[in-house]
Amino acid sequence: MDSYVSPLCQRYASKRMQYVFSPDFKFGTWRKLWIALAEAEKELGIDITDEQIEEMKAHQTDIDYDMAAKKESEVRHDVMAHVLTFGEACPKAKPIIHLGATSCYVGDNTDIIQMREGLLVLREGLLACIKSLRDFAMKNKGLATLAYTHFQAAQPTTVGKRATLYIQDLVNDLDNLDFQLSRLRLLGCKGTTGTAASFLELFEGDDEKVKALDKAIAQKTGFEGTYAVSGQTYSRKVDYNVLSVLCSIAQSATKFSNDIRLLSHLKEVEEPFESKQIGSSAMAYKRNPMRSERMASLARYVICDSMNPAITASAQWFERTLDDSANRRIAIPEAFLAVDAILALYNNIISGLTLYPRIIAKHLNDELPFMATENILMYCVSKKGGDRQVLHEAIRQHSVAAAQAVKCDGKENDLLERILADKTFNLTKEELDSVLDVKAFTGRAEKQVEEYVFETIDPLLEKNKNRIGSSIAINV
């Protein structure tokens, strides 16, 4: 306990995402790439034996990290340290390991592979959240609630309709994620400045073999192809494009978490709260929305972190500079780890969210009299033969008086009682109640939920039914 450990690993991110950015995955992928390179070079006529390749495969995962660290302290180069370490384990293959390649062959290609795997993990998490929100929206499609604009009471909506707004944001994020996944390519084998000169030399000027090598490496690692042109590295705008997707997910999560926090204050909803959970070390009664707050906190980090690849991409000189390296080692993995944690929290909250319908109804009923005044006005003119101008002035006076009683005296809103007692309106209790039917104020909200779910979300979930992630335990 005498050295720093990232909270993203210690407290928040899943083991699965941690593995994607672990030394085992990273350096194991380096070795896979060296094996793929040797295989492809052999297939294209380079003098490499099956025995050498089999030796490399036999030592693909038994990485001597102590030796690699010792080598790096000597040579001050992480890739060469691992080339030498792999060579110690594979003496027969040692002469052909990394043949013709530059450091970015393993470094950049592995980064792309890690980002692809990370995006696939996040994709499952997004689908899980969409599925949970879909069920929540359908369950509460007709539950009327106050809508808020400027966090002031506005025309009612339904709890389910509000949930579809969160779903739509996540579907947008999923579309962006799929688009970036479809665009990912390997760097391939481009050499020190992207010209593939070393491989052209290796194949004695055979241009077709150099192109075939690039294609073979992509196929062996599950990619459609490689980037057509590059410097020593692939364009760092790729990193920016990928982290823009993660930033977008963080934005969606922030909006959702903020709404939950505000609704928690209103006592309309409550996020999952464990039986022995403590809300405050001082105030024993507290039930803070700490999961939503954590979502907002992690999302803020991701939104800020997404600026790193933007600045890195803009600051690269010519075919490459190394001022990208240290930044990318931190910025890219941590963005993935944080968004992984965000989606786990998102799904946990929506799956265990408690609603308090009576509180929701109370808040609605507190404001409904003011919202109903236009309907009352129309009813009294069309059904009772009232004078629109006279009725409008009466409503204005009663509304001011009722609002004064609520704000200054702390009384209940008695606007409807005032209108019912005013002979100008000539209304019975039954007539007034018919005008106040809450369904008349929520418009198409319930139907909008059904249409969106049945026409858009259910087909999406059916198409991806085998790719929906499972719930991840929230431990702290």
Image: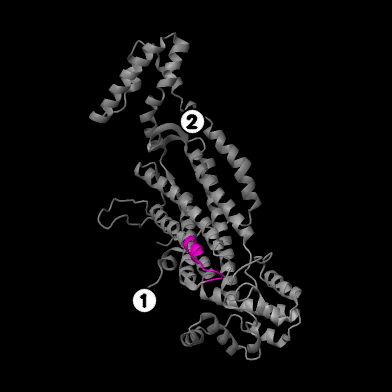
Q: Residues within 10 Å of mark 1 (few under 14, many from 20)?
A: few
Residue 193, located in which quarter of the rendered image? bottom right
Q: Do the residues labelled 1 and 2 touch (CB within 8 Å)?
A: no
Image disc number at residue 442 = 2
Q: How far apart are marks 1 and 2 (CA)?
A: 56 Å
Q: What's the residue type where badge 2 is placed?
A: Thr
- Residue at image coords 58%, 37%: 450
Apparent side of residue 303 relative to residue 201 in the rendered image (left or right): left
The quadrant the C terminus occupies is: bottom left
Residue most extreme to the front: 318
**Marking on residue 120:** none
Range of residues picked out in magenta: 309-320
Could you tell me residue 245's position as x and y percent?
53, 56
Q: Which residue is drawn at 47% across and 34% down?
A: 157
Percent across and percent down for residue 281 are 27, 58
Helix, strand or loop under label 2:
loop
The residue identified by callout 1 is: 3
Image position of 441 with respect to 127: above or below? above
Is 269 above or below relative to 198?
A: above
In-front residue for pair 424/175:
175
Query: Any magenta on residue 157?
Result: no
> Which quadrant, please, contains the N terminus?
bottom left
